[in-house]
Amino acid sequence: MTVSAARSSSLSAFGLATAQDVFALRRIGQSAAEALGMDRQDQVRIATALSELGRDRLGCGGLTVAFTLPEGPEPVLAVVFEWNGGTKAGPDLEPASRLLHRVRHESADARERIVAEHALPAGWADTPAARLGVREALRRHAPMTLADDLRAQTRDLIATLEETRAQREELRRLNDELEETNQGVLALYTELSQELEETNSGVVALHAELEEKSNRLRETSEAKTRFWTNISHELRTPVNAVVALSRLLLAAGSAPLTEEQRRQVSLIDASGQTLFSLVNDLLDMAKAEAGQLEIVATPVDLRALVGQLGAVMRSTGMPGDVVLLTPPPGTLPVTVTDEALLTRILRNLLSNALKFTEEGKVRLEFAVDPEAAGQWMTFTVADTGVGIPESELTRVFEEFYQVRGPLQRAQRGTGLGLPYARALTELLGGTLRLSSTPGVGTRVEVRLPHRPAAPPAPPAPEADA
């Protein structure tokens, strides 16, 4: 086997004339693959493929083989077999095609050739020093005998088998790890499924318990509403009789009473009126909770409403050192709302403020919210009374609850004023907020929808008959 000079992309070129040249070609191909940084399997593939191609073309006239590193987008090792055409049947490329990336047969003029290509590893750097190392690897192999070639093939086969066995052991180890992982995942899935099932069972039980409690609360609320309604209806008749009879006794045309009798009858009248107011409040609360309290929205002149309410509150008795202040009439518009409910709200709030204020003033204020384009109005009742401790602010809206204190004990009440006022406020679509400071006073804001309306026209004068 002779060695010729190589072109710029060629590493070495050899002539193939004998079986020993084919044996040497196998070793040269393996050394070239090793010098190019290919792994053991690729080295064996290249050596075997070149050996098969060399044996197939052995005997062709002018047969040569060249190792090249051609320029191109994909770095490859190209081994080119060339011979004179017509000296032998077409080549068998199937064995080599199974081992290498690409193998093709070409014909040009009187010469034919086989180009066998295999991709270079990713870490290969094409430098002059690297090419020189490959050329040296191609030149250092002496001619081999058939026995040498068989021994070399046997060594390659043993090395390949060892590598295959190591890979098989690694694959078995990986399979064992995968099986253990799968068992762990299965156990975790089973545990999670059991926990999820237990959680679902607990949620179902909790839902059933909550539903049962909700039904009980609904039944309790309905029973309370029925109780209030029945009691209110049952009490209205005797209370009306007590109030009416006490007023008849106090009327100017009735039989004269002694001073003591008049005082006792006055107490009966005051107690009857208080009881009558309580019965009405209870009945309204029951209707509101049952959704039976109807809203009758009509144009309401707030000047008349506030003026009448202030006169009633002043006439029913006020502490001597307390002043009730109301908004100037000119600032009060006409709005569309339920006049009876609005009157009850303000009466309850003013009554509470006057009841728990010993000196100072109780002020009723009115304002239209400018930020809401005039669609909301606010009534504010502020007093300089005893105030409410912060810990009691949430409880004052509980029905029948009263804040404990010396003044509270001196003033009789039902504990329905604030809950009743808030219930009616929410029924009108508004909100009620309370703030208080002990010893300074209490402030209650009622925010309601405001629908301005024209003042009601005065009644037409009756025509003379």
Image (cartoon, rainbow, N blue to C red):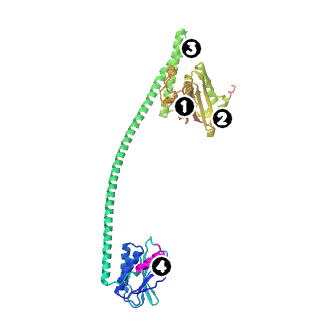
**Of the numbered discs in the image, which one, if any, rests on residue 434?**
1
Q: Residues within 10 Å of mark 3 (few under 14, many from 20)?
A: few
Label 4 vs 1, first from the N-terminus: 4
Quadrant placement of the C terminus: top right
Discs 2/1, front: 1
Q: Which residue is mark 2?
A: 454
Q: Earlier in the sequence, mark 2 or mark 1?
A: 1
Q: Which residues are magenta?
A: 125-138
Q: Residue at x 42, y 88 (%)?
A: 83
| Tag 2 and tag 1, C-beta contact below 8 Å | no
Q: Which residue is mark 3?
A: 251
Front position in the image: 206 or 306: 206
Density class for disc 4 (Cα within 10 Å; few <14, some 14-19, many ≥20) is some
Separation (CA) of disc 2 from disc 4:
100 Å
Q: Pick out the residue farthest to the right.
A: 464
Type of residue at label 2?
Answer: Ala
Q: Earlier in the sequence, mark 3 or mark 1?
A: 3
User: Given the image, on which type of amino acid does mark 3 rest?
Assistant: Ala
Residue sitting at x 48%, y 33%: 289
Q: Earlier in the sequence, mark 3 or mark 2?
A: 3
> What residue does disc 4 label?
70
Real-space CA distance between mark 4 and mark 1, rounded to the nearest whole angstrom:
91 Å
Circle 1 SS class = strand
Q: Is residue 335 above or below residue 279?
A: below
Disc 4 and disc 3: Cα gap in Å?
130 Å
> From what the image shows, is residue 183 above or below residue 227?
below
Can you give x and y, in whole percent of width and height, for residue 37 in the image? 41, 73
Seen from the viewer's position, the closer of residues 31 and 363 is: 31
